[in-house]
Image: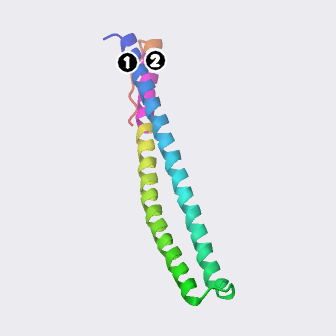
Amino acid sequence: MTKAQKAQILLSRLQIQEVAVTRASQHLDDARSRLAEVRLVLKSEGAEIRHLEEDAPNGGDTPAQVDDAVKRVKSDLEAAKDLEQKRQAIESEAELQLRTEQDKLNTLETQLDELVREIENPDAQSVRVPH
């Protein structure tokens, strides 16, 4: 295989890997956005609980109504906390996937750089850089 053929193959692989990095980056952005949404819900639910516990007794609701409302919101809060944990795990996985894809891209870029140096200076001995 000629160096030109190797370069063409590397360029094709590089383009494919760039798409994979872009996709992984978009997945991470989406995961972060979804996690932020859940965190807003958590904040809202916490504020609602504080409001119910502090202000509702003066608002005309019966203690039973306030207790029911607090229980409902606390249940919603627990569900949101569970969802937050799941979305944190998804975000962590997305970060790892992006790093993996970026590492693959970096490796291909290094290989292409080495090949370009070999083509530019065919007399120089190729020195591989450990990855």
Instruction: Give 115 or 104, whichever is nearer the viewer.
Output: 104
Q: Which mark is residue 116?
A: 2
Q: Where is residue 112 drawn, in percent x and y?
A: 43, 22
Residue at 45 percent of width and 42 percent of height: 98
Residue 35 visible in the shown view: yes
Describe residue 105's horizontal placement relative to residue 51 as left or right.
left
Q: Which amino acid lies under the numbered mark 2 shown in the image of this protein?
A: Val
Residue 9 numbered tag: 1
The amino acid at mark 1 is: Ile
Query: Between tags 1 and 2, which lies in front?
Result: 1
Q: Secondary structure at mark 2?
A: helix
On the rendered image, what quadrant is the C terminus found in? top left
Q: Nearer the viewer, residue 44 or 123?
A: 44
Q: Quadrant for the N terminus, please.
A: top left
User: Which residue is rendered at x = 40% and y = 11% of the image?
Assistant: 4
Q: As drawn, which residue projects farthest toward the left?
A: 1
User: What residue lies at 46% left-to-right and 30% top-to-bottom?
Assistant: 19
- Is 6 inside the magenta-drawn segment? no
Q: Residues within 10 Å of mark 1 (few under 14, many from 20)?
A: few
